[in-house]
Image: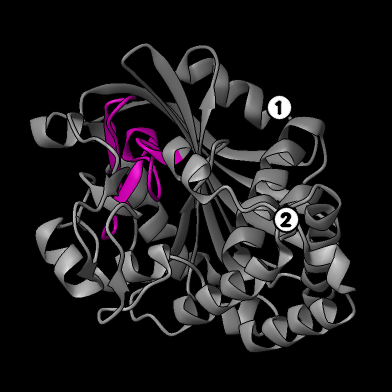
Amino acid sequence: IGLVAGSVLSSRVAQYGDLLNTGASLLFLKFGRDDENEADALGYRYSLEHGYDVRESVKLFNMLGRLSGEAGSRVPEWQSTHPDPGNRVQAAETRLQKLQPAQLTNLKINRDVYLRKLNGMVFGENPRLGYFASNRFLHPDLRFQIDFPAGWSKANMPEAVVAQSPDKAAQFQLLPAKGSPASVIQEFVKQQGVTARQSGNTNINGLPAATADFDATTEQGTLYGIATSVQHNGQTYLLLGLMTSQTANTNAAPILATMRSFRPLTDAAALNVQPARIEIVTLPTEMSGNVFVKRYPSTVPDEEIYIINGIDAGTNVKAGTLLKRVIGGVRN
């Protein structure tokens, strides 16, 4: 689809296109490595100017290097989206070599003060704001769930839930809307550049809904679209599918199936799910990293605990040291 949804003319449709562009950039585009390198240099300068020990930056980039090799990491592959961590270590060491000895005196780290502020912090995504369980998206606070097609790339953002087909010729988004389902659809198809093929009221799993098939004119050509609005628990939603006309035969069916899967969330376990949180532990005695993860188990893999604490399984950690563990959360 080439991220052309934003050119479907009119401010309202362009708004939806902007969300697609934002979501797609998070999902499918790469970060600028030059920008990342500049950010590293600026962070180094600001830290030094405020009296923080910039020698700690080497540890940070070593940690990122460990993340890049962790199987099943919850962050993108660093080698493809960021400057190579090894190169960032070298760059940090080069910057350090340019400092005079006097510039490295009386610098602060404040590790314990900082760690205590992290106690209770949400670790990873907050499932209360919506989360994916395989191809299903569940939103405990808004009390709905919806199933996405297998193999589609997807992301949950503050503005919308977005997804893109494997052939990148179709995109789907779920957004909040205002008014009745019928009024939302009527307003949508009145937009310049949008021509409704057919529209009407319906219901989805017992919920009041309205839907329309439409063509959307863009500078790059005509897109085929499906818009559905559904009302649940006092909130109206717009479910929007866009695809190239040439792929409508293959992409319309999974988009329709996704829209029709919208339904109330009633499972008690899902409704009551809570985020994972950081818990700060003060070691009562000296112990190895391996002993720590056994004595203070977490709900994430041991390797993640080693990484976020900057230790290994065999590292001996002194008594009184503050370490992080992760408790609670959703296991997909």
314, 242: nearer the viewer: 314
Q: Amino acid at mark 2?
A: Leu
Q: Quadrant of the C terminus?
A: bottom left
Residue 130: x and y, percent?
36, 39
In this picture, residue 149 sits left or right of residue 236: left
Residue 186: x %, y % from top left: 60, 22
The type of residue carrying mark 1 is: Lys
Q: Where is residue 180? Give x, y as percent.
A: 47, 13
Q: Is residue 150 in sight in this rendering?
A: no
Residue 247 appears in the rendering: yes
Residue 201 spot, x, y in % from top left:
40, 23
Separation of marks 1 and 2 at Cα, in angstroms = 62 Å
Name the residue located 65 percent from the left edge and 31 percent from the top edge: 189
Q: Which residue is mark 2?
A: 107
Q: Count neighbours of disc 2 (C-alpha within 10 A) and say few if under 14, some if 14 to 19, many if 20 or more.
A: some
Residue at the spot 78% in from the left edge and 54% down from the top edge? 47
Left or right of residue 285: residue 36: right
Q: Which residue is mark 1?
A: 190
Q: Secondary structure at mark 1?
A: loop
Q: Nearer the viewer, residue 244 or 24?
A: 24
- Callout 2 secondary element: loop
Question: Does the stretch in magenta take in 50?
Answer: no
Residue 274, compared with residue 73, is above or below; it is above
Q: Residue at x 31, y 15 (%)?
A: 233
Q: Which residues are magenta?
A: 118-147
Q: Earlier in the sequence, mark 1 or mark 2?
A: 2
The label nearer to you, 1 versus 2, is 2
**21 lies left or right of 173:** right
